[in-house]
Image (spheres, grey):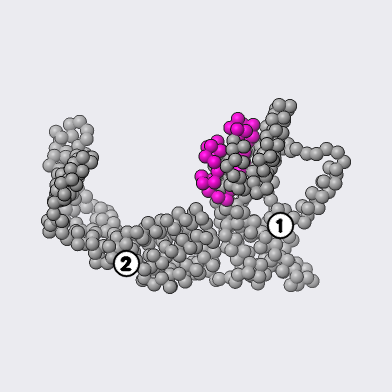
Amino acid sequence: MARTSATGGGDLFAAAAEAQLAQQAPLAARLRPLRLDDIVGQDDLVGPGRPLRVLVESDRLSSAIFWGPPGTGKTTLAQVIARHTAKVYEQLSAVSASVKDVREIVAKAEQRLGERGQGTILFLDEVHRFNKSQQDALLPSVESGLLVLVGATTENPYFEVNAPLLSRSTLFRLQPLDADAVAQLLRKGLEAEGADADAEALSHLAERAGGDGRHALTSLEVAVALARARDPEAAGTVVTIADAEAALGTKLHRYGRDEHYDVISAFIKSIRGSDPQAALHYLARMLEAGEDARFIARRLVILASEDVGEADPTGLVVATAAAHAVEYVGLPEAQLNLAQAVVHLATAPKSNRAALGIWRAREHVRNGVGGEVPVHLRDAHYRSAHSLGHGVGYEYPHDDPRGWVRQQYLPDEARDAVYYQPSRHGYEQEIAERMDRLADGADNGPRPDHDRDGADRDRGDRT
């Protein structure tokens, strides 16, 4: 790896100062990986044969944006890249850097390339903090290849990074570390600190990290200090659950495998039972225990169709929006989105009739009920289809002033099957009344002529 460095006798003092700082550095900085193999929790990016690993190891990385929550390894990845590249590695923070700083980097890169044929990688931390003019100052150098930009951001780059700059970069998304990855980091931290920890303490620290490796190691450092202060004469330092709780400022909520299933069961049943108070209680217990917010969101999306269904069709929209918010915003802020979805679903009218409908239909099909698709419903778009009778007799509903005609849609073997029977709850009451009117052959009367004409113009596929 090549780096820019000063010359002269000051190097010895600088090296001594750097060594001293390294000894005093926080645990997270001391444990910063030096190799791709040491990075935990991002196997999709840096595992064997994965795209980013291949590009880094072959020193062929072009401009890239690392997007992910705090503590997932964005800066670590950049520094590992610095150790693998033959290019000169420069680093700026968008929090403090100016356009002048960027221009100085560009000037040095031009000189370096002209004199030695050596390229430059610029790592720009918090790239989203650069304003438009600052990002524009980078663009020509990135576009020409003079600079290989590696930007790191916790914000959605599609909103925060100029489109021209983003289009010239490869986006790599880093995910929050799961509990196993955080626990692996914590074990490395204990080894570096010359300490040990109870399994319960280790689990508590891992679960409360929220996928943030740096936060987990900082909490561990505090817990180790508390353990040593508690018993300075002990032969070895052992972090207990009390030390972990004190370091985090939160008590351990017992939440083992059984609690996981019991609490989520109570959560779902409370929403199904229209009790928002209980539903919020169990949501809080899961969040405090470090439950994966994405798991909670997935359960809400399922429940919205299974237990609310057409009684309130907006329930699925709200649940899906909450699931998207969890991915986009992340905890702790996404607790608000989850809470809104929980209250909406718990207070919504309930119906499982749509769910029952698909379950009944699939059971019917599994039991062999099927049969030929009625001839008038078959595809009639290809040549000779009409000579086979396909589509013959099909009545196009939009041609009828009621927008509906009575004709057979189910195959003969299932023509009398009833899968969906709407309840009389919420919006499904209106669906039930509409279906009753259709079953009786009634309608709301002819539509106005201009509506009928519009339907004729926009009728689309009539075959």
Question: Looking at the picture, does residue 391 appear above or below residue 23?
Answer: above
What is the total number of numbered labels drawn onto the structure image? Answer: 2
**What x and y, as percent, mark residue 103?**
68, 36
Query: Foreground: 291 or 322?
Result: 322
| Relative to 35, 422 lies left or right | left
165 drawn magenta: yes
Name the image quarter holding the N terminus.
top right
Q: Residue at x 67, y 45 (%)?
A: 97
Q: Amino acid at mark 1?
A: Leu
| Relative to 143, 350 lies left or right | left
Which range is magenta? 140-168
Could you say which quadrant of the image residue 26 lies in?
A: bottom right
Of all residues, the one furthest to the right in this rendering is: 9
Q: Residue at x 19, y 59 (%)?
A: 434
Q: Residue at x 62, y 37 (%)?
A: 137
Count neighbours of disc 2 (C-alpha within 10 A) and say few if under 14, some if 14 to 19, many if 20 or more.
Answer: many
Q: Which of labels 2 and 1 is toward the front?
A: 2
Q: Report which residue position mark 2 lands on.
A: 349
Q: Is residue 312 visible?
A: yes
Q: Report which residue position mark 1 lands on.
A: 27
Count neighbours of disc 1 (C-alpha within 10 A) and say few if under 14, some if 14 to 19, many if 20 or more.
Answer: many
Query: Foreground: 181 or 7?
Result: 7
**What x and y, as percent, mark residue 239?**
68, 67
Separation (CA) of disc 2 from disc 1: 52 Å
**What x and y, as percent, mark residue 3?**
74, 38
| Relative to 174, 113 lies left or right | right
424 drawn magenta: no
